[in-house]
Amino acid sequence: MITQIVIHLMPYEIDFFEWQIKQLKQGSLYLDKEDEIIIDVTLNLNLVNWNKSSIPSSFFETKFKQIEELCDWCETNFVIDKNNNCLGCDDKRRDSIRASKSDNILYLDTDIIFKPELLKYIIDSSKQIDNEYYIISPQVTRLWDNSWDILVNNKHLNRPPSQQYKEICPFEIINTPIDEIYLKDIDDFKFGGGWFNLLSTNLLKLTDIPDSFGPYGVDDTYVMYCCTLLKNNKYNIKQYSLDGLLVAENIKYGNNPYKDYLNLIDKKDEFRRKAEANLSIEIANFKEKI
């Protein structure tokens, strides 16, 4: 089984990425010999004005290449983009999906904290599934509204839904005492794009990420809507939660050490507005397609 880990990387995230790659390297020690991993990451150097920055792009390029040396246990596709081909995570994911020959695609944001063992458990879980189309998600702590509760670990359900999750130590979250680890059907479709979700490549090739979304925004929302449409049209599709193993965003300790040294070009809101403007159109297109 081939699992492709897809990551979009901004230069100021390079330290978090290095830490994450070390976690994945530790996780590789738990894998079966037949498990094939591809780490597919693009370093996006397009959204920094390098002429007005006090750290040159070569610093990040060199460090990026050095981090790749830690991936001697798997196949890699480490790409440096300076030509505006990859301006956001939608660009990266779209290109990876269309070129992929893997069985599974695992979306991973650089600020996600996880136990190294999670990689083994989520891949092993996919081997138990007969569905052609599926999503497997780790559990989370209580988030900002009740709609996420289908993914919340029971030991965190007593927390009130709020923004307070940002203040919780992510290492405390992922080290919630484990009673049992098991795969559980959930009744709906709910996931945050880069939160260590594993999706069947068959599903992502069917939904795709429309070009109209541009570089960033709503791709996870779009796939969730598509999944509901597929289910309503009798497709063999399910989402599962991996009960007992949690992930967390590293918001509490997610300071950017490069913020005073890089002149960033912030187009995130512009990109998001473009994607949101085309969401309902693309959902209608997908409904017609199936």
Image (tube, rainbow, N blue to C red):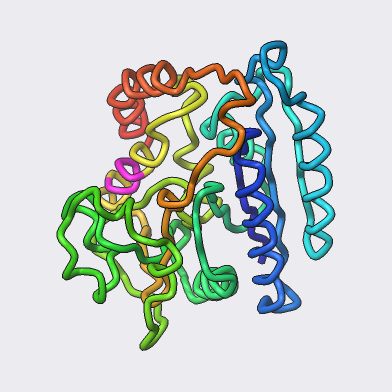
> Percent position (x, y) of residue 179?
36, 88
Identity of the residue drawn at 33% across and 23% down: 276
- The answer to which of 169 and 184 lies nearer the viewer is 169
Q: Which residues are magenta?
A: 224-228
Membership of 225 in magenta stretch? yes
Side of 263 relative to 179 (left or right)? right
Identity of the residue drawn at 49% across and 36% down: 208
Side of 57 relative to 2 (left or right)? right
The overriding secondary structure of the stretch rendered in magenta is helix
Q: Quadrant of residue 11?
A: top right
Image height check: is 290 above or below 108?
above
Identity of the residue drawn at 72% across and 17% down: 83
> Percent position (x, y) of residue 214?
49, 21
Membership of 203 in magenta stretch? no
Q: Which quarter of the figure is the C terminus placed in?
A: top left
> Percent position (x, y) of residue 256?
54, 38
